[in-house]
Image (cartoon, rainbow, N blue to C red):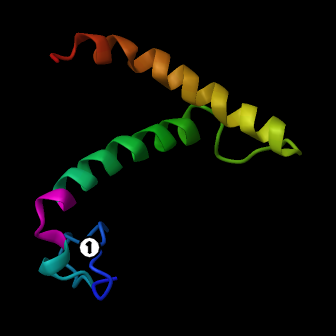
Amino acid sequence: MRRRGVTPHVAQHTNGRRSAIDRRTTRPPGSAVSQRLRKRIEEVFGWGKQIGSMRRTLLRGLERVRWSVTLPVAAYTLIRRPKLLAAPA
């Protein structure tokens, strides 16, 4: 990726063990922004798996599975909406 001029935005182990990701990758300011956005996205999936029945589908067919994911994500958005509206612009 570096030969092509692309900086990867990947997570680095920070819990005491050695990470395969060096500081060249985590130093750019875009990397910190990417990690904050990643956390926000992972929260949606975590909520969906714990509360929104997205852990394992019991349905067959792409359309049914798509709906089984869309409904919990829409519910999460409705739950989060008051916080989003209250946030200063």
Q: Is residue 16 above or below residue 43?
A: below
In-image side of 65 versus 21 (left or right): right
The residue shown at (64%, 46%) is: 55
Instruction: Look at 34% across and 11% down and name the residue there.
Output: 82
Q: Where in the figure is residue 7, as x and y percent of width and height? A: 26, 73
Compared with 81, 9 (above or below) is below
Task: Reply above or below: 66 against 13.
Answer: above
How many labels were placed on the picture?
Answer: 1
Closer-to-camera residue (52/21): 21
Q: Which residue was labeled with disc 1?
A: 7
Q: Secondary structure at mark 1?
A: loop
Residue 83 x, y percent position in the rendering: 29, 16
In the depicted view, which residue is nearer to us: 50 or 23?
Answer: 23
Instruction: Find out whether residue 63 is within the magenta segment.
Output: no
Q: Main secondary structure of the magenta part?
A: helix
Of residues 1 and 51, which is closer to you in this image? 1
Q: Is residue 88 left or right of residue 20?
A: left
Does residue 86 sit above or below 68 in this rendering? above
- Quarter in which the C terminus is drawn: top left
For the record, the magenta segment spans 26-31
Relative image position of residue 19 (x, y in whole percent) = 24, 82
The residue drawn where x is 29% and y is 11% is 85
Left or right position of 24 against 46: left
The residue at 20%/17% (across/down) is: 87
Image quarter of the N terminus: bottom left
| Callout 1 amino acid | Thr
